[in-house]
Image (cartoon, grey):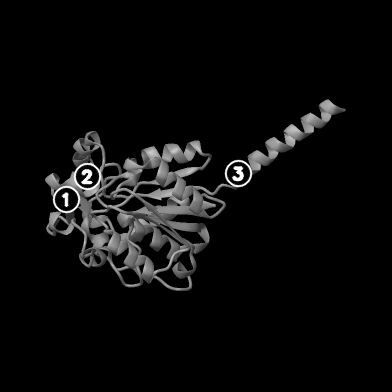
Amino acid sequence: MKAITSMMAASAALITGTAMAAEKPAIALVHGAFENVHVWDGLSAKLSADGYRVIAVDLPGRDTSPMAPNQVSLDLYRDTVLKAIAGEKRPVVLVGHSFGGFPISAAAEAAPEKIKTLIYVAAYLPQDGESMLALATGDRDSKAGPQLKIDEAHGLASVNYAARADLFANGAPEGLRKVLPDLILDEPLAPMATPLHLTAARYGKTDKVYVHTAFDHVVSPWLQARMVAATPVRASYTLQTGHTPFLTDVAGLAAAIEQAAQ
């Protein structure tokens, strides 16, 4: 009898553990401008090891998803995100980095029922009618503006090569700072200049969390605080990093996302 009881208890524990794992929402990761999907590799591995299903979204118009700049739009980015999560039976946690805040916001406006929580990681947190370029040019403390080159003829924006390490990897180990400039890509211009229409009834009711980056040179802490004041969020976390915590503090970023996802 004791053996049977022990087996029943073990089976119950296993079932409970499996159920708890199954209850974890899928986490979809949307990269920002001048990046591709591989910026998430380290974070994806950590979240997967912690029992989460991870969907890394590859936005079109870069080396891993080639498309001519004149064919890329913010609507296409939105639809790419929605397609990536279309097969999920339960609402997902949708994470956006930097410019990735725009596609995830657009996805929430289009299909709020598909999204459990929006998590903005050093991301632009838009209001109705705003574009990324409008927010970026109003960022008084950002160091990125003077380092951007706008090529209207080819529909691309690029970052001064010599400034890339200081912008995107300030405070990072020297080895990362040396390789990072070659990882920064040219970015299709049109989506960044496109205003986003958002409503209180759809986007406004979607749960939101913000992950601040205390030493950010791209989306400054001043702008991050200003955006959160304009669009209140359920919770905020602050990482002691620059603009790319998925490279410099994987454990800290994973912990913030996992706490927000509960």
**What is the secondary structure assignment of the residue under circle 2?**
loop
For label 1, the residue is 159
Q: Which mark sits nearer the N-terminus, 3 or 1? A: 3
Q: Which mark sits nearer the N-terminus, 1 or 2? A: 1
**What is the secondary structure assignment of the residue under circle 1?**
strand
Q: Residue at x 33, y 57 (%)?
A: 123
Rendering coords of residue 54 (x, y %): 46, 43
Q: How far, Cα to Cα, is label 3 from label 1?
A: 42 Å
Disc 2: CA contacts within 10 A as few (<14), some (14-19) or many (>=20): some
Q: Residue at x 42, y 60 (%)?
A: 107
Q: Which mark sits nearer the N-terminus, 3 or 2? A: 3
Three-letter amino acid code of the residue under disc 2: Ile
**What is the secondary structure assignment of the residue under circle 3?**
helix
Cβ atoms at labels 1 and 2 below 8 Å apart: yes
Three-letter amino acid code of the residue under disc 1: Val
Q: How far, Cα to Cα, is label 3 from label 2?
A: 36 Å
Rendering coords of residue 234 (x, y %): 48, 63
Q: Residue at x 37, y 71 (%)?
A: 230
Q: Is residue 109 left or right of residue 3?
A: left
Disc 3: CA contacts within 10 A as few (<14), some (14-19) or many (>=20): few
* Whether residue 86 is visible: no
On residue 10, the disc is none
Rendering coords of residue 76 (x, y %): 34, 57
* Whether residue 233 is visible: yes
Q: Is residue 73 left or right of residue 80?
A: left
For label 3, the residue is 22
Rendering coords of residue 140 (x, y %): 21, 65
For label 2, the residue is 184
